[in-house]
Image (spheres, rainbow, N blue to C red):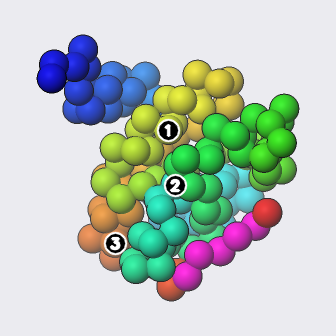
Amino acid sequence: MTLKKGVKQLVAEANAEIETIPQDRAEALLGDPNVQIVDIRDVRELEREGMVPGAFHAPRGMLEFWVDPDSPYHKDVFASGKKFVLYCQSAWRSALATKALQDMGLTPVAHLEGGFRAWKDAGHPVAERAQRKD
């Protein structure tokens, strides 16, 4: 099977159009009242590895539905006017998700360089269980 575009190309194209928050600036976002960090990983990943403290969990499969105010699944957190910083395990899903939300018109939105793996490797704090704010 030949694809028109592979995952690596899609991620590269998304990264060319979105904001990426570098790891050396990431921890400073914790507690910022104007920023909402969003974990888009599967719930099993959260249970296994923890998450960024204070992050809102929005599974990747529901993200666009939760963001859209016309959706029956809308979550008010996405109408807060805050800056949203998405992350996944290695910054591939979050790049694609950030691009999708940007295309929907959600602003400001960015993603975390290197994802949760890089967050942990940098020694940033990790919460042991998912925190829901909806």
* 133 on left or right of 12: right
Q: Which residues are magenta?
A: 129-133
For the point 76% across and 67% down, which residue is it? 133
Give the x, y percent position of residue 44.
45, 72
The span from disc 3 to disc 1 (Cα, nearest Å) is 21 Å
Q: Earlier in the sequence, mark 2 or mark 1?
A: 2
* 38 on left or right of 77: left
Residue annotated with mark 2: 40
Q: Earlier in the sequence, mark 3 or mark 1?
A: 1
Mark 2 secondary-structure assignment = loop
Q: Which mark is residue 120?
A: 3
For the point 80% across and 37% down, which residue is it? 71
* Viewer-proximal residue among 51 and 36: 51
Q: Amino acid at mark 2?
A: Ile
Residue 37 appears anywhere in the view: no
* 77 on left or right of 65: right
| Above or below, 31 relative to 15 | below
For disc 2, the neighbor class at 10 Å (few under 14, some 14 to 19, many from 20) is many
Give the x, y percent position of residue 97.
50, 38
Q: Which mark is residue 78?
A: none
Q: Nearer the viewer, mark 2 or mark 3?
A: 2
* Viewer-proximal residue among 130 and 32: 130
* Viewer-proximal residue among 85 and 3: 3
Residue annotated with mark 1: 97
Mark 1 secondary-structure assignment = helix
For disc 3, the neighbor class at 10 Å (few under 14, some 14 to 19, many from 20) is some
The span from disc 2 to disc 1 (Cα, nearest Å) is 8 Å
For the point 55% across and 82% down, which residue is it? 129
